[in-house]
Image (tube, rainbow, N blue to C red):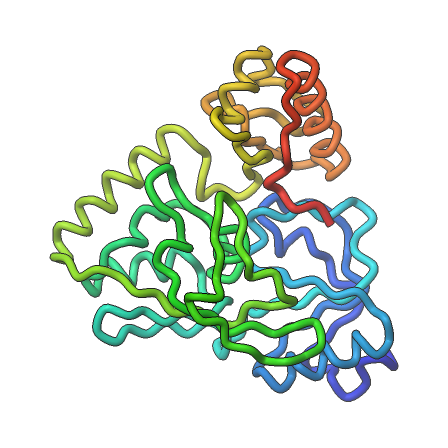
Amino acid sequence: MEIFGGLEHTVRETEPLAPHTWLMLGGPARFYAEPTCRDDLAEVVRRARENDVPTRLLGGGSNVLVRDHGYDGVVINLSAPAFSEIRVDGNELYAGAGAKLSHVVATSVREGLAGLEHLVGIPGSVGGALHLNSGSRSTDIGQWTRGATVLTRDGELITRQSNELVFSYRQSSLDELAILDAKFLLEEEDPAELTRRLQKLWIVRRANQPSGERGTCCMFRDPQGVSATELIEQVNLKGTSVGRVTLYDRDPNFLLADPGASSDDVLKLMDLVRERVATTFEIELDAELQIW
């Protein structure tokens, strides 16, 4: 491991990635880094860049599919405490990118800060949620974001202010190598009322989607003006399986990977859905699932 000599406390070789992803599928990473501080992170990025080693950031792994042969580069996970801090100051909430989104939602509700409770049940980390602008039908995380610290691919730390941020459906302008932290401006509300709202939102989400369960993920973004779920239902693919992977019966835009499934099963099932929808409606579905 000459490239990362001296960083053995941070970088490991041939790390299985399946345990680090929500689908629990895929092969190993050539290198796997868990930096404990920003200096370690910057050094890993610098050495990877100098040696032309491709680099990816892995958050909670809830929307990532690693191919069966793995990833021939360095995968960086910001799960260390230095990247997972959550704190509240008045009606502002600060969160590290490695913090679990569920913890941020729970903290905001406990502190009587409204806005993020609509994200209940969405798995993953704050960094991943910001990158893809995770949300519900009524709101998204970008609506409440007022700034973010990012690490560029050149290793430079930059703070993006709210006037520099652009959020749209399942997309954001935060596309640098890594998001390190973010600040949210929320609305003060009675914690008891917020808790009741959170519980109702959780019940509704659980009734319709397998959110919060390992081995599941959402496949496609909604095309403009229609939902991917409705399109898949109308081509009669609900419950369809390829290998050990099945479309969820209540929301066929979600798939369930049983033990023994492969990443190739997932890709074949997604191709089947995409082809059937394109043939029937002349609509191309864009993947929400990130494929490495």
Identify the residue at horizontal 70%, vertical 35% (top origin): 261
The residue shown at (41%, 74%) is: 85
**Image coordinates for residue 255, horizontal then vertical, percent:** 58, 31
Say which of 188 and 163 sits in front. Answer: 163
Q: Is residue 27 left or right of residue 2?
A: left
Q: Toward the viewer: 168 or 288?
A: 168
Q: Is residue 50 left or right of residue 124?
A: right
In this rendered view, identify the residue nearer to me: 115 or 72. 115
Figure quadrant of residue 200: top left
- Whole-percent x, y for residue 65 in the image: 67, 45
Q: Is residue 111 left or right of residue 47?
A: left
- Figure check: 260 above or below 173: above
x, y percent for residue 144: 35, 58
Which quarter of the rendering shows the N terminus? bottom right
130 shown above or below 267 = below
Residue drawn at point x = 57 percent, y = 70 percent: 78
- In this view, the residue farthest toward the front is 163
Q: Find residue 145 and report its horizontal and vertical position in percent.
A: 39, 62
Residue at 21% x, 73% y: name it. Answer: 90
Front in this rendered view, residue 169 or 194: 169
Q: Quadrant of residue 136?
A: top left
